[in-house]
Amino acid sequence: MSSSTLPPIVLAFSASDPTGGAGVQADLLTLASMGCHALSVITAITVQDTAGVENLQAVDSEWVVDQARLVLEDMPVAAFKVGMVGSIENIAAIAEVVSDYPDVPLVFDPVLASGRGDELATEDMISGMCELLLPQTTILTPNSREARRLVQGDGEDDDELALPGAAEKLLGLGCEYVLITGTHENTPQVVNTLYGPEGVVRSDSWERLPGSYHGSGCTLAAAIAATLANGLELPEAVREAQEYTWQTLNAGFRPGMGQYIPDRFFWAREMDEPGTGKA
Ligand code: PXL
């Protein structure tokens, strides 16, 4: 393959998930399935099964910087994706590296807890994300719980806080767009809303699927990085990434005793009755 036919390259900062459901493994599968080449900078390793996270070990922040710098000096990157960061030092390290590439879109999935509720970020790390990463973020992709937690102080826990207000505060912290996903809201359909500088840009409703999924947020954020890297305008990139993600969930499987895992290569397998998910 000549360099003129390179696939778009996306650099993902994320943590290893041995189950293959979330983290680096989700990024690699999603980016490959959507026609991109993934560069993986590992921020932490976790010990987990499909039920939850037992332990984690952050990678030394100098190693995070070194992993990123060497591949960035070697290859052209069309988008960044940031997932689980592992430590406050790694937040500063990632912020420093990406600040040298202000024209490359950055998708930030603020991973705060596992599906079971295991904490994956401290209050200090949340402050670091808001101060150092949000001002460099093209699109932030929190679920509704993460959106509320990012804008509430330590100890505040108002799960009724209205999402448009949370979005406004997040935009005020410097990100260009916020996509708040509605899986955890008590609504018949899953409603995902994209907010930009002028307010709501688009709102998409999806048929709510019955299972609980491990790695759905990672899949959606990586899919947005892929659609942006493929040259789509942001609102269209967000729509297409949601469509892809819903298909991966619809084709999800349950390999262990915990959550379902999205099938990022659903299209490579036979499916009985493919739906569209559009509600
Ligand atoms: O789904 C968020 C997530 C991201 N990255 C890693 C994780 C999880 C959730 O458990 O373990 C490595």
Image (cartoon, rainbow, N blue to C red):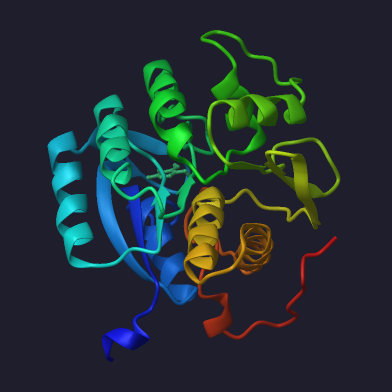
Task: Name which residue lies at 28% across and 58% down.
Answer: 40
Q: Residue at x 38, y 48 (%)?
A: 102
Provide residue 96's location: percent of width, then percent of height. Answer: 27, 37
Up/down of 135 relative to 246, above or below: above
Q: Is residue 279 visible?
A: yes
User: Residue 173: x and y, percent?
Assistant: 54, 26
Q: Is residue 96 above or below residue 71?
A: above
Q: In this image, 176 relative to 110: left or right? A: right
Residue nearer the viewer, 76 or 237: 76
Instruction: Please identify the quarter of the rendering in which residue 70 is found.
Output: bottom left
- Percent position of residue 213, x then y: 58, 51
Q: How many marks?
A: 0
Q: Quadrant of the N terminus?
A: bottom left
Residue 92 pos. (x, y %): 28, 30
Q: Is residue 242 left or right of residue 45?
A: right
Which residue is painted at 64% across and 58% down in the image?
A: 238
Q: Quadrant of ligand 1?
A: top left
Q: Is residue 174 left or right of residue 243?
A: left
- Identify the residue at the far top of this view: 155
Work out which quarter of the rendered image holds the C terminus and state it. bottom right
> Is the residue 202 above or below the residue 3 in the image?
above
Q: Image quarter for residue 254?
A: bottom right
User: Which residue sits at x=52%, y=84%?
Assistant: 268
Q: Is residue 60 visible?
A: no
Looking at the picture, tell me which residue is in the foreground, 199 or 178: 199
